[in-house]
Image (cartoon, rainbow, N blue to C red):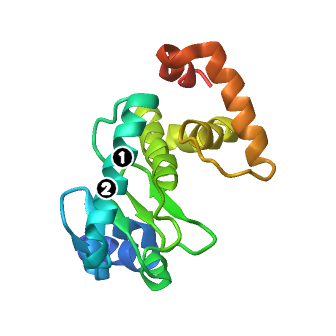
Amino acid sequence: MLIQITLISLLLSPVAGWAFYKPMRVLAPEWNEVTCISEEVCVEDLARAEEAKSIYELALNFVNSSAGVIRSNPRTTFCSSAKCFEAFGFHAPAKAKTVGVSGIVVGPSGWKEYFLRHEIIHHLQSEQLGVVGQWLSPKWFKEGMAYSLSEDPRELVEPLAKYRDEFHRWHQRVGKEGLWIEAKKL
């Protein structure tokens, strides 16, 4: 009886995860009515596929040259509607969200290169520090780095502006070469 319960639980775990932890859906975005046009880029609206590919390639190249080389390019789903973004468990005002090293979902108002650069930086943080390490890192580092190195042009509200400034000062001190070595010490 215990073996049967264990087996049933193991079989139902992915289904429960899919149903109750929607960000898990980045693992198989096609199941949420999007089309993957490559290994890395999925879109809800095929008419915007070239736009999505362009934003993705520009953002990825930018992060690789400014923050560190990404080992595994993140799969990114570009939603054109709130319904799509919400199907992955996210809501406005968020523009885009990263789920560890599993993937990124861009919302309907997040189709800008600097928003995706921000999320790719979070992906890189998870690669470099581990998903738990990234999650446990100081807010000023995690968000400050993403806002600073993505070159987000917006005027930020507090505490985000403070995080960006604190990261900028820290980054000037440790330099690009020492970034990840020092980040692991935080």
**Residue 37 image point, x, y percent:** 19, 66
Task: Identify which amino acid the numbered label 1 is placed on.
Answer: Leu
The answer to whether mark 1 and mark 2 are in CB contact below 8 A is yes
Picture residue at 62% right of the left edge, 22% below the top: 171
- Circle 1 sits on which residue? 58
Residue visible at 27% across and 61% down? Answer: 41
Report the quarter where the N terminus lies: bottom left
Q: Nearer the viewer, residue 87 or 167?
A: 167
Which residue appears at 45% of the width and 30% of the height? Answer: 66
- The answer to whether residue 5 is seen in the rendering is no
Residue nearer the viewer, 143 or 63: 63
SS for dot 2: helix
Mark on residue 169? none
Given residues 86 and 59, the one toward you in this image is: 59
In the displayed image of the protein, which residue is found farthest to the right? 158
139 vs 66: above or below = below
Q: Which residue is mark 2?
A: 54
Relative to 124, is 85 above or below? below
Dot 2 amino acid type: Ser
In the displayed image of the protein, which residue is found farthest to the bottom?
A: 83
Q: Position of residue 73 (x, y in %)?
A: 29, 45
Between marks 1 and 2, how big is the CA–CA gap? Answer: 6 Å
Q: Secondary structure at mark 1?
A: helix
Label 2: how many Cα within 10 Å (few below 14, some 14–19, many 20+):
few
The location of residue 106, given as percent across then percent down, is 44, 65
Q: Position of residue 55 (x, y in %)?
A: 37, 55
Q: Quadrant of residue 130?
A: top left
